[in-house]
Amino acid sequence: MVKVTVSGGSNGLGKVIVRAIAATGKHEVSVLSRQGKETTTENPIPVLTADYTNPESIASVLRSNGTEVVISTIGVLFEDTHQSMMSLWSLGFAWGWYDLTSYKKSEKTLNEMFPELETITFKSFMARCFGEAK
Protein backbone atom coordinates (compact mmCIF):
# COMPACT_ATOMS: atom_id res chain seq x y z
CA MET A 1 0.00 0.00 0.00
CA VAL A 2 1.20 3.47 -0.90
CA LYS A 3 0.64 6.24 1.66
CA VAL A 4 -1.15 9.08 -0.15
CA THR A 5 -1.82 12.48 1.40
CA VAL A 6 -4.29 14.89 -0.22
CA SER A 7 -3.72 18.56 0.59
CA GLY A 8 -7.01 20.41 0.49
CA GLY A 9 -8.79 17.09 1.00
CA SER A 10 -11.35 18.42 3.47
CA ASN A 11 -13.60 20.01 0.87
CA GLY A 12 -14.61 20.07 -2.77
CA LEU A 13 -12.55 18.17 -5.32
CA GLY A 14 -10.06 17.08 -2.68
CA LYS A 15 -12.77 15.43 -0.60
CA VAL A 16 -14.02 13.55 -3.67
CA ILE A 17 -10.48 12.35 -4.42
CA VAL A 18 -9.99 11.22 -0.80
CA ARG A 19 -13.22 9.22 -0.93
CA ALA A 20 -12.26 7.65 -4.26
CA ILE A 21 -8.82 6.60 -3.02
CA ALA A 22 -10.26 5.22 0.22
CA ALA A 23 -12.92 3.28 -1.69
CA THR A 24 -10.30 1.36 -3.69
CA GLY A 25 -8.76 -0.09 -0.55
CA LYS A 26 -5.41 -0.10 -2.39
CA HIS A 27 -3.77 2.85 -0.61
CA GLU A 28 -3.62 4.45 2.81
CA VAL A 29 -5.02 7.95 2.44
CA SER A 30 -4.80 10.97 4.72
CA VAL A 31 -5.77 14.62 4.46
CA LEU A 32 -3.33 17.52 4.90
CA SER A 33 -5.26 20.43 6.38
CA ARG A 34 -4.36 23.78 7.82
CA GLN A 35 -7.47 23.75 10.00
CA GLY A 36 -7.55 20.14 11.17
CA LYS A 37 -11.18 19.59 10.18
CA GLU A 38 -12.49 16.10 10.78
CA THR A 39 -12.85 14.25 7.49
CA THR A 40 -14.54 10.88 7.24
CA THR A 41 -15.88 8.55 4.62
CA GLU A 42 -17.15 5.15 5.71
CA ASN A 43 -13.93 4.80 7.71
CA PRO A 44 -12.22 7.66 9.52
CA ILE A 45 -9.52 9.31 7.41
CA PRO A 46 -6.47 10.63 9.31
CA VAL A 47 -6.23 14.41 9.20
CA LEU A 48 -2.73 15.90 9.35
CA THR A 49 -2.48 19.55 10.36
CA ALA A 50 0.29 21.82 9.05
CA ASP A 51 1.00 25.51 8.60
CA TYR A 52 0.61 25.82 4.83
CA THR A 53 2.72 28.98 4.74
CA ASN A 54 5.70 27.14 6.25
CA PRO A 55 7.34 24.51 4.01
CA GLU A 56 9.23 22.97 6.94
CA SER A 57 5.96 22.48 8.85
CA ILE A 58 4.55 20.66 5.84
CA ALA A 59 7.70 18.55 5.42
CA SER A 60 7.73 17.58 9.08
CA VAL A 61 4.10 16.45 9.03
CA LEU A 62 4.51 14.49 5.78
CA ARG A 63 7.69 12.79 7.00
CA SER A 64 6.18 11.81 10.35
CA ASN A 65 3.20 10.32 8.52
CA GLY A 66 5.39 8.37 6.09
CA THR A 67 3.65 10.00 3.12
CA GLU A 68 4.90 8.72 -0.24
CA VAL A 69 2.63 10.65 -2.65
CA VAL A 70 1.05 14.09 -2.25
CA ILE A 71 -1.95 15.13 -4.30
CA SER A 72 -2.59 18.85 -4.01
CA THR A 73 -6.10 20.13 -4.55
CA ILE A 74 -5.55 23.52 -2.95
CA GLY A 75 -7.32 26.19 -4.97
CA VAL A 76 -5.56 29.38 -5.98
CA LEU A 77 -8.40 31.82 -5.53
CA PHE A 78 -7.01 34.11 -2.87
CA GLU A 79 -3.56 35.31 -1.86
CA ASP A 80 -3.37 33.05 1.21
CA THR A 81 -4.19 29.91 -0.78
CA HIS A 82 -1.72 30.96 -3.48
CA GLN A 83 0.93 31.26 -0.75
CA SER A 84 -0.05 27.82 0.55
CA MET A 85 0.42 26.24 -2.86
CA MET A 86 3.73 27.97 -3.39
CA SER A 87 4.90 26.62 -0.01
CA LEU A 88 4.18 23.10 -1.20
CA TRP A 89 6.09 23.69 -4.44
CA SER A 90 9.05 25.32 -2.69
CA LEU A 91 9.24 22.27 -0.46
CA GLY A 92 9.48 20.17 -3.61
CA PHE A 93 12.28 22.36 -4.92
CA ALA A 94 14.19 21.85 -1.66
CA TRP A 95 13.96 18.10 -2.23
CA GLY A 96 15.55 18.42 -5.68
CA TRP A 97 12.50 18.65 -7.91
CA TYR A 98 12.89 20.38 -11.24
CA ASP A 99 12.09 24.06 -11.65
CA LEU A 100 8.50 24.08 -12.82
CA THR A 101 8.40 26.93 -15.30
CA SER A 102 5.48 25.71 -17.38
CA TYR A 103 2.66 23.25 -17.02
CA LYS A 104 4.01 21.12 -19.87
CA LYS A 105 7.34 20.79 -18.11
CA SER A 106 5.60 20.03 -14.80
CA GLU A 107 3.71 17.13 -16.37
CA LYS A 108 6.95 15.73 -17.78
CA THR A 109 8.65 16.22 -14.42
CA LEU A 110 5.95 14.33 -12.53
CA ASN A 111 6.24 11.44 -14.97
CA GLU A 112 10.04 11.41 -14.57
CA MET A 113 9.81 11.53 -10.78
CA PHE A 114 7.18 8.82 -10.48
CA PRO A 115 7.44 6.61 -13.60
CA GLU A 116 5.58 3.78 -11.86
CA LEU A 117 2.58 5.98 -11.07
CA GLU A 118 -0.08 7.53 -13.21
CA THR A 119 0.05 11.29 -12.82
CA ILE A 120 -2.59 13.90 -13.37
CA THR A 121 -1.73 17.55 -13.86
CA PHE A 122 -4.44 20.16 -13.68
CA LYS A 123 -2.97 22.34 -16.39
CA SER A 124 -5.06 25.43 -15.76
CA PHE A 125 -3.78 25.52 -12.18
CA MET A 126 -0.16 25.08 -13.23
CA ALA A 127 -0.49 27.77 -15.87
CA ARG A 128 -1.97 30.14 -13.33
CA CYS A 129 0.91 29.59 -10.89
CA PHE A 130 3.82 29.38 -13.28
CA GLY A 131 2.71 30.96 -16.55
CA GLU A 132 1.75 29.52 -19.91
CA ALA A 133 4.17 27.30 -21.79
CA LYS A 134 6.24 29.25 -24.25
Image (cartoon, helix red, strand yellow):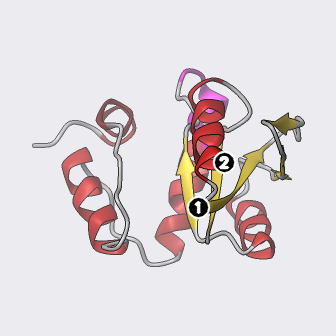
Q: Quick check: 26 left or right of 127? A: right
Q: CA distance from mark 2 to mark 1?
A: 8 Å
Q: Is residue 79 magenta?
A: yes
At 19% across and 49% down in the image, what residue appears?
Answer: 104
The secondary structure that most of the magenta stretch takes on is helix
**Residue on which disc 1 sits:** 26
Residue 19 against residue 102 in the figure, above or below: above
Percent position of residue 128, x then y: 36, 31
Q: Quick check: 101 left or right of 29? A: left
Residue 84 against residue 119 in the figure, above or below: above
**Residue on which disc 2 sits:** 22
At 24% across and 48% down in the image, what residue appears?
Answer: 102
Q: Quick check: 115 left or right of 43? A: left
Residue 49 against residue 2 in the figure, above or below: above
Local packing at callout 1 (Cα closer than 10 Å; few below 14, some 14-19, many 20+) is: few
Magenta stretch? 77-84
Percent position of residue 84, x then y: 64, 42
Q: Amino acid at mark 2?
A: Ala
Q: Dividing the image into 4 quarters, which one contains the N terminus?
A: bottom right
Q: Is residue 81 magenta?
A: yes
Percent position of residue 42, x then y: 80, 38
Q: Amino acid at mark 1?
A: Lys
Say what secondary structure mark 1 lies in.
loop
At 26% across and 54% down in the image, what residue appears?
Answer: 107
Residue 134 against residue 68 in the figure, above or below: above
At 35% across and 55% down in the image, what residue appears?
Answer: 119
Q: Quick check: 16 left or right of 126? A: right
Task: Write down the quadrant of residue 61 in the picture.
Answer: bottom right
Percent position of residue 3, x then y: 65, 67
Closest to the observer: 53 or 45?
A: 45
Closest to the observer: 25 or 113?
A: 25
